[in-house]
Amino acid sequence: MDSTAELIAKLRKEIEDHNHRYYVLNEPLISDYEFDIMLSQLEKLEVQHPEFFDPLSPSQRVGSDLSQDFEQREHQISMLSLGNCYSKEEVSDFDQRIRRLTDQNFSYVCELKFDGVAINLSYKNKRLQHAVTRGDGVRGDDVTSNVKTIRSIPLVLSGDDIPDQFEIRGEILLPHEGFNQMNKERLQKGEASFANPRNAASGTLKMQNSSLVAKRPLDCYLYYLAGDSLPENTHLGNMMAASKWGFKVSRHIKEVNTLDELFAFLDHWELAKSDLPYEIDGVVIKVNELDIQDELGYTAKSPRWAIAYKFPADQTETVLESVDFQVGRTGAITPVANLTPVFLAGTTVKRASIHNEDQIRLLDLHYGDVVMIEKGGEIIPKIVGVKQDKRHPLAKPVQFINQCPECESDLNRIEGEAKHFCPNSTNCPPQIKGKIEHFIARKAMNIDGLGQETVELLFDQSLLKDPGDLYCLKREDLIHLPRMGEKSTDKLLESIHKSLEVPFERVLFALGIRFVGETVARKIAKALPNMQNLIESDKESLMEIEEVGERIADSLINHLSDPDNINLINRLADSGLSMESEADEALSSNILKGKSIVVSGVFHLLSRNEIKELIEKNGGRTSGSISKKTAYVVAGDNMGPSKLEKATQLGIAILTESSFLELIEYKNL
Ligand code: IVH
């Protein structure tokens, strides 16, 4: 090795040791300043010597601003979940179950149940290979580039007895301090705050720009080692080994030999959890000996040798002072309780959601009632009960409203639906503001630099009455607004301009048509060539589109028969927004152009999805149900008899797998 290579290797190792001391052991040896100097020395050398580039160098922890799509990756060993229990009796039952299955002596390990996002890290020859989310347990999203930015996760391991290849699982979380800071900044920017640290951690992990992830103080505790040749024959032994290799393993892990000791651990943490700097929602109990774990084995969903004891949701009493009725973007009305402020699980609670009219009836809510509130996974608590015996005899029952509190329109309640709606979608202020916020969201038109407060301000000044007005905003309209200034104004205008490149499927999603989410919008844009075609489609042909059922078809027809909505679409089209589906460049032929095809049954040469892809690649579109517009049915084995009957009745050509492949002249088998 020449000396530059040696120097780079030495710096990398030293920097990672300091990272470990700072982020894992909490025992820094050098100042931040000294650390920064070492890091910049390394960065400089790496720029001068690109031949020594290593994606796992500590310099790579700052992430990159290249946008990424997450690939799916299979776990080497499936990620199972745990059985839950909520009482000591259930923990005793768990213990009894195990003792019936084994005669051997064993101990339990108790540890904290971190409330974050599960992650599976795989290592090969001491180097991090992949970081994958749990997903469906078999495969998840490969989020390696984001996870690399978490300083407490070692990129390269050091130590002895490290297996050549293994997976280690843990939980990525955002400590309270980072969470509060992040929400504060989001509110200042006019962005919606995250409901809880878990959502914030999960949202961060799925961000497309890893350099932004690097700025969020995520942390990671590891709690399970999986692989063929583990160093020890107990869980605790393996966790101690993992901690020696550089992983962050919680100190609050304890081997217990009796149920009494175990219960003492539960009692202790139920009280002490609020002193932790991060969120936990229970305790995990695991059989310590690996041979007994093997003997006990697994059910389809979870190991028989472990269980999660969940703390009861935090509850408290307070008084219902009044009820507000809020109007959402779709016009849905949600009653919200105003409560006498009360401290519950770390925050002061002033409001609680009551969902809908049925809930008010069910609880038989009266003004002034003493109510029980509970904080579950979400930050907005709910009312779970009323102390009837404490009710004032003259208390008035809470009545649902008949008119919109914002625009006074008469409310509708569609049969079978729980919510009331304000029908005035084009003139009711919160609906308009909500629609604009949806329109500019990242997954829709992705217009940056317009927070909730600025939307409100522009709306109040009549500069923004619907999403179409965005494209008429001028520099002089914006520059004098509070918090805007020249730079932000230019950034916003540029972002609005850039949104003209957003493809039709996202424009369609941005319109905020009820029930038309991202996926449905994509399917519609794939099935139909342009907006005009969508406007002219009848219910039957809409229902031929994959994922579009009666409810969505009705909603589309309803939306597109309203002249105000058509007017907005026309204005958006005039502003230059894309109203046409992009031609599929990868089209292999036009043999099936304009043909609607139903695929049904089990196939032998290709999978059903591959057949569907081939239909689309040859210009056709697939549909879930047979109608007189169906051109062909591609039938595999076991096609449903009712489908077969309908196709025969309507005289639709039925193709076998091979005759279909012949038709499209498929030659790749
Ligand atoms: S052990 C086979 N230990 O809880 C071992 N899980 O409800 C499986 N979790 O999916 C996991 N803290 O995301 C384990 N100390 C801990 C945990 C823990 C949090 C999560 C994990 C799991 C879920 C199950």
Image (cartoon, grey):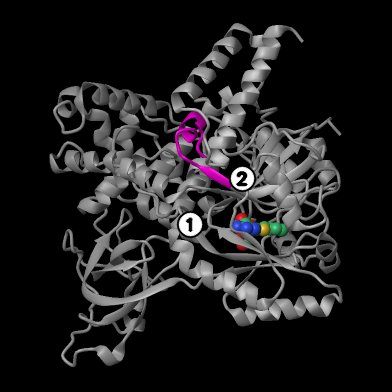
Q: Quadrant of ligand 1?
A: bottom right
Residue 157: x percent and y percent?
Answer: 71, 34
Q: State the residue in front, 629 or 247.
A: 247
- Residue that badge 1 annotates: 279
Position of the N terminus by quadrant? top right
Predominant SS of the magenta segment: loop
Q: Is residue 108 left or right of residue 164?
A: left
Please give the name of the residue rendered at 37% of the width and 55% of the height, measured from the top-left corner.
558
Q: Is residue 207 magenta?
A: yes
Q: Is residue 521 left or right of residue 246?
A: left
Q: State the residue in front, 134 or 151.
A: 151
Q: State the residue in front, 645 or 520.
A: 520
Between discs 2 and 1, the one toward the N terminus:
2
In this view, the mark in front (2 or 1): 2
- Residue that badge 2 annotates: 248
Q: State the residue in front, 264 or 398.
A: 264
The type of residue carrying mark 2 is: Lys
The magenta stretch spans which residues?
206-220
Residue 648: x percent and y percent?
Answer: 74, 59
Q: Is residue 337 left or right of residue 242?
A: left
Quadrant for residue 74, please give it: top right
Q: Is residue 95 above or below residue 274?
A: below
The type of residue carrying mark 1 is: Glu
Q: Is residue 311 above or below residue 365?
A: above
Residue 261: x percent and y percent?
Answer: 64, 73
SS category of the residue bearing label 2:
loop
SS category of the residue bearing label 1:
loop
Query: Quick one: which residue is furthest to the front in this view?
Result: 29
